[in-house]
Structure formats: C-alpha cells, structure tokens
Amino acid sequence: MKRPATGTSLARHCSICGIVIFAAGLLVGEASAKTFNVRAFGARGDGRALDTEPLQRALDACSQAGGGVVVLPAGTYLSRPIFLRSRTTLRLDKGATLQATDEPKDFRDPASPGAVLALVNGKGLEDIAITGPGKIDGAGARWWEPVRAAKRAGTPEPQRRPRLVVLTGCKHVRISGITLANSPSFHLVPVECEDVVIKRITVHAPADSPNTDAIDPSACRQVLITRCVLDVGDDNVALKSGHAVPGRTAACEDITVTRCTFLHGHGMSIGSETLGGVRHLRVRHCTFQDTISGLRIKSARGRGGLVEDVTYSDITMKDVKIPLNITAYYPKVPAADTAQPVARDTPRYRHIRISNLSATSTSSAGLIVGLPEQPVEDLRLENVHLSALQGLTVRNAREITFRKVTVQVQRGEPVRLENAEVKQN
C-alpha cells in the first residue's frame, strides 16, 4: 500500500460494522523529509512586503525535489493566493502567520471570470499537509461589512468573497495544529477529497462575521475531525453534498467528528445541500456552548437527497438556542404546508440515532420536522435530557422512538406532535 510522505493517517470504512477506522501505519514523518525554508527563497516575513512569489517558489521547489516540508519561521508573510503541491507539508512555526491581503482584486481567478481563489489552494493533489502551531489569517474584516450592509438592506452581496483554504479532489490530507482565523467566508473547505484528517486545529472569527463556516467537507469521504476548537459566525462544521459523485453511494460518507468544542456558530450541520446524499456520519464526545444550533440537518425541496445512518452520542450543550434542529425546510419552517410529489431532490432523513445528550437551551428544545410527503423516518432518542424555555416539536415523522428522554420547559408542552408517530420505551 502506498504511504503518504507527510504523516497523514489513512482512513477506511468497515462496511460490516459501519465504523470509520483510522490507521496510522508506518509513515514517513516531517523529521526525515527535506525542508525548504521560505526565507531562503526571498520571503521577508515583515508583514509589509508581499511574499507571494517567494512562498510559491518554495512550494514549487519542494515539489520538484520529490516532496518535503516548506517551513514558514516566525514572522508575518503577506500574500495573495498560493498553490500547494503534492507530497508537500506546509508548516507554520510558532509565531508565523500567513496573512492574506485584503485587496479584492488579488483574489480574482484569471482562469474563470467572476470566480475568486482562496488564499491557500490545492487541486488534484496527494499526500499533503498543513501543520502548526502558526496561523493563517484571511483579513476578513474588510469583506464582512459590505455583506452585513447588504443583508440589512435586503440586497445581494456586492461581490464574491474568497475562502481561506480550499482543497479540491485531493487524497491523503492532514491538517493539524494550525490556527485558521478571520476568513472572508468559509475557512477550511475540502471538496471531493478522500482520507482527510483534521486534528487539533483552532478556527475563530467574530460571532457576527457572516458565512464564516469553520470546516465544510463537501462531497468528501473518509474524514476524521478531532479535538478541534471551532468559534465562528456560521456553521462550525457543515457537511455539504450538492451533487452526486460517480462511483459513490453518497457524495458525503464515512465521516467522524469527535472530541471537538463548538463555541459561537451554527453548530454541527448537514446541508443545506444534500442532493448527492450523506451517510455514515458519527459525532461523538463533543461540547457546544453559545451556538445557534446544536445538531442540525437542513435541506429543502429542490436541493434535497438521502441522509441516513447518522449517529450522535455523548454530547453536552450549554446555552444553545436550538439543541436539535432537524428540518426538511430551509431557511425557515412554515407554519403549515401541503404535500407535493416526491422527486429525486426531495429531502429524505432516516436511520438517525441520538444518545447520551444533555442540553440547556436559551429558546426551544428543538425541531424534528420532515415534509408531509416525506416524513423523517426511524429516528431514536435515548438518554436525552433537554431543558429549554419551550418544548420539542415533532412534525411529519414516523418510527420515532424516545427512550429515557426528558424535556423540561418553562412554558407550553414539553413535546408537541403534529402528524408524527412517537413510541416511548
């Protein structure tokens, strides 16, 4: 079996037991790899000189030498978009910051009019890593205020915003130790990637920064996200599946999120794009505080697909606005609705397990809401304890099981059923 040169763990899915297994194997570590110090390629690291060209020269030289480690020592490296290469680790030492410019024209993609590049880009690569303990900063403040103003006015965004790190069609990816901050929009976006390990990273942006998702695996499989601290202005983690991927049962599959801390943000999300399908998600031993949602599945007619085999366990939430937020409507659940014909893009949620969850809410216990033509199916809550101002709404749902479930509310019914079948064990 081919082994990554950058210390990437390999992930594989056990189809019999439905568990994602990550095996380290005998890998070549950074200590034995060739190193390429960006200072030797002319990088100043003073936060004023533009270091894009020396950074890219170092990355290219590393690739031409067969791979290795590109090192950013302490300093601030101001840069336009850069492009990773296969068999390369980008390492930011303590005190090192890769700092994006905040000039919009710097991020225009010359190959695609109207499109924008990320600060760090990779496409079709293998055996790549970004490691810490340094920081990658997206200089998002200049981008956020026009978006806030557009939202207040009810008008479209004035221009497309870059993301911080986008890796497309890559295999054997490791992101560890790094801090990602202040992206103009999403921070870390693996797209159609396989065997991705994201470990001990910190992602932060102001709580009111628009669309600053922390980690968005999009049409990815064999992903591990572990021991991360995620404090942003939108989804902390969001699995996106906007299209089918040839050769896969589901575009997003075999994903584990474990021992992560979710702070300000919109929680652990699936969607809103689920057209390509999502299956085999495990979320375990995570804590949430002051997020808008806790466990969230969101989609809508026209952008929906099959979401199945999803397990959440050993979860603690404090002052989360909506601990359970599972709906087939996005962005808003209507007060009433009528059934429509089921189509390929109708959201369908089934085989969902939530166990050992304790949550306090600043608003409602939550929502479990399917469509009248396509109810939520086979969802089980076990050892779940919710304390909220208002209760849990279950609508358009069948084969719902509650076992050792308590919902404490200050007003109204603890559980409100609308076209729903709930079995209490």
Image (tube, rainbow, N blue to C red):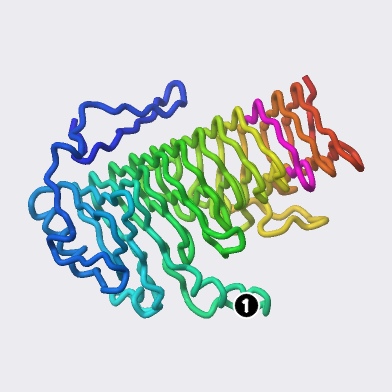
Residue at mark 1: 149
The three-letter amino acid code for the residue at tag 1 is Ala
Q: Locate the N terminus by quadrant.
A: top left
Residue 328 image position (x, y, % from top left): 67, 50
Q: Is residue 135 left or right of residue 425?
A: left
Q: Looking at this view, is 347 or 98 the one in front?
A: 98
Residue 108 image position (x, y, % from top left): 35, 76
Q: Residue furthest top?
A: 425
Q: Is residue 75 visible?
A: yes
- At x 40%, y 46%, the residue is 220
What segment carries the magenta color?
353-367
- At x 89%, y 40%, the residue is 410
Q: Is residue 376 left or right of residue 251?
A: right
- Asked whether residue 190 is drawn in magenta, I would say no
Q: From this view, report whether residue 3 is shown above or below residue 344.
A: above
SS at mark 1 in the image: helix
Residue 263 image position (x, y, % from top left): 59, 47
Q: Is residue 69 left or right of residue 341?
A: left
Q: Looking at this view, is 120 or 206 the one in front?
A: 206
Q: Looking at this view, is 86 or 15 the one in front?
A: 86
- Asked whether residue 363 is drawn in magenta, I would say yes
- The quadrant holding residue 63 is bottom left
Q: Looking at this view, is 13 or 358 the one in front?
A: 358
Q: Locate the C terminus by quadrant.
A: top right
Q: From this view, report whether residue 316 is shown above or below residue 90.
A: above
Q: Is residue 262 left or right of residue 81?
A: right
- The quadrant holding residue 29 is top left
Query: What main secondary structure does the magenta stretch of the protein show?
Result: strand
Q: From this view, report whether residue 324 is shown above or below residue 108.
A: above
Q: Residue furthest right?
A: 412
- The quadrant holding residue 10 is top left
